[in-house]
Image (spheres, rainbow, N blue to C red):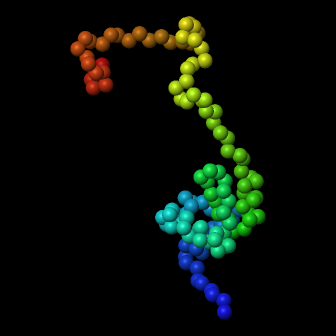
Amino acid sequence: MSKTTQKTPLQNLLITTSENAAGFSVSGITGYAPELVRRVANALVKSGDLVRAKLGARSVRYFANDDLARAYQAGQAPARRGATAVLGPRTKARWSADEPGIITPQTKIYIAPPLPRRVLRTNTYTQF
């Protein structure tokens, strides 16, 4: 005797959505809490109804079969990593502090009038 279970509306929605070429991501399913969608999708993966395709460190899409998942992954460009500084965001400039600034004909130099003596904080006074 085989055990047949009826699918919930969310399970049916996920199965039909996974049949297109782009599959679905958890954030793409509206009307349900993302935690619920993730739990149901993981249960469907465990039962063999869906296939999980990991696209990045934190990016997952679900597909109806393995062929759709492979085709989608093949069409995705590899993620580009931004150039990160070795020493962090507060590294030294590539030029020395003694070098003069480059002044071209397009350079505009503004000289602001000095503030009054009694101004302690300029961000609290709108007139300065």
Number of residue marks: 0
The residue sitting at 55% across, 30% down in the picture is 88
Task: Work out whether residue 39 can be spotted.
Answer: yes
The residue sitting at 50% across, 63% down in the picture is 35
Task: Work out whether residue 101 can be spotted.
Answer: no
Left or right: residue 102 compared with residue 115: right
- Residue farthest left in this picture: 118
Nearest the viewer among 43 and 32 is 43
Rendered image quadrant of residue 27 = bottom right
Residue 99 placed where, x, y %?
57, 8
Q: Is residue 44 above or below residue 70?
A: below
Residue 57 placed where, x, y %?
62, 50
- Residue farthest front in this picture: 87
Rendered image quadrant of residue 104 = top right
The residue sitting at 62% across, 62% down in the picture is 24
Nearest the viewer among 123 and 93 is 93
Nearest the viewer among 66 and 30 is 66
Rendered image quadrant of residue 20 = bottom right
- Tell me the quadrant of the picture where the N terminus can be found: bottom right
The residue sitting at 61% across, 54% down in the picture is 59
Residue 52 placed where, x, y %?
66, 63
Left or right: residue 111 compared with residue 74: left
- Residue farthest bottom in this picture: 1
- Tell me the quadrant of the picture where the C terminus can be found: top left
Residue 82 placed where, x, y %?
63, 36
